[in-house]
Image: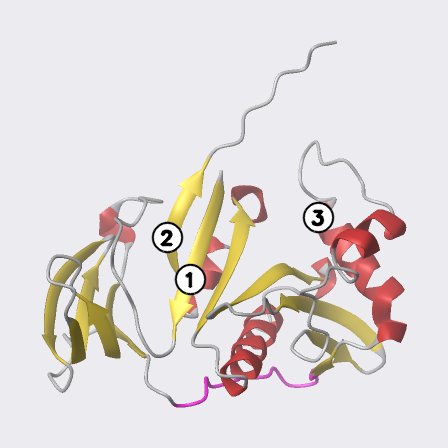
Amino acid sequence: MISRLRIGAAGVCFMCAVAAQAAEASRPVVVVRAARLLDVETGEMLRDRAVVVDGERIRAIVDGRAPAPAGASVIDLGDATPEVTVPDGIELRPYQAADARAVYQVIEDAFNEWPDREPTTFEGWAAHVISHPAFAPELSRLAFEGSELVGVALCDDYEGQDEGWVPQVATKATHRHRGIARALLQSAFAAFHATGRRQVGLSTDTRTGALTLYERIGMRVRRTYTSWAKDLN
């Protein structure tokens, strides 16, 4: 199953139901503040409101200055630059052309952990990703420990679109659970924010186990779909 997620930094439109990914009892309460909400029935833009999300359901829309429920996580979607927390010993920087082979290898090694995945050649990956017209090296982020590349978040910036896009995120297996992927995405969000983008999206495969990470940094499922295949041999 593939999940599409989106985070807004200046406005959020709740126009479709959130797809259930787990039992509601395991979901935290999240308060989304400083959002602009579009009332799809009247077309009115509601300002300075807060949305209380309980599990996969919107519990209430309240005054943006109202205190959050006890124990709730708060996501501030105002114009403040997204915060970036970088783990000790890790350095982040934008992608450079000389990084191509190393970036490919980190992504390929990570994605090849999925069952039944067909390997991708460097040439095929490069044509699809870094040669794509929307690829934005200045927004993409690489994580290093010393001279070793340990994580990547590649970004696409589509002209005329309000939403930035992160087509690939990967961390070396030896460096996971240290907050590197979180830092890469937060830094990418901040880079998009600086260009005027106020939404960032990505797609994830359930085989990656990364959905929880994306939710913890404020992303929410907007759409899911299942891919079916049949071997005709």
Camera-side residue of 62 and 206: 62
> Where residue 174 sits in the image (x, y, percent)?
73, 62
Q: Residues within 10 Å of mark 3 (few under 14, many from 20)?
A: many
Is residue 209 in sight in this rendering?
no
Q: Quadrant of residue 69?
A: bottom left
Q: How many marks?
A: 3
Q: Residue at x 76, y 76 (%)?
A: 95
Does residue 121 appear to the left or right of 200 in the view shown?
Answer: right
Measure how far apart labels 2 and 1 are at the Cα level. 7 Å
How dense is the environment of label 1, judged by Cα within 10 Å: few (below 14), some, or many (20 and up)?
many
Image point (46%, 47%), residue name: 3
Bounds of the magenta segment: 80-92
Q: In the image as oriented, which residue stretches furthest toward the front?
A: 160
Front position in the image: 7 or 142: 7
**In the structure shown, which secondary structural element does the residue marked by tag 3 occupy?**
helix
Question: Residue 129 versus residue 224: which sits nearer the camera?
Answer: 129
SS at badge 1: strand
Residue situated in front as seen by the camera: 93 or 14: 14
Q: Nearer the viewer, mark 2 or mark 3?
A: 2
Q: Which residue is mark 3?
A: 111
Q: Residue 92 location in percent, x, y?
A: 69, 83
Quickly name the residue at label 1.
Answer: 6
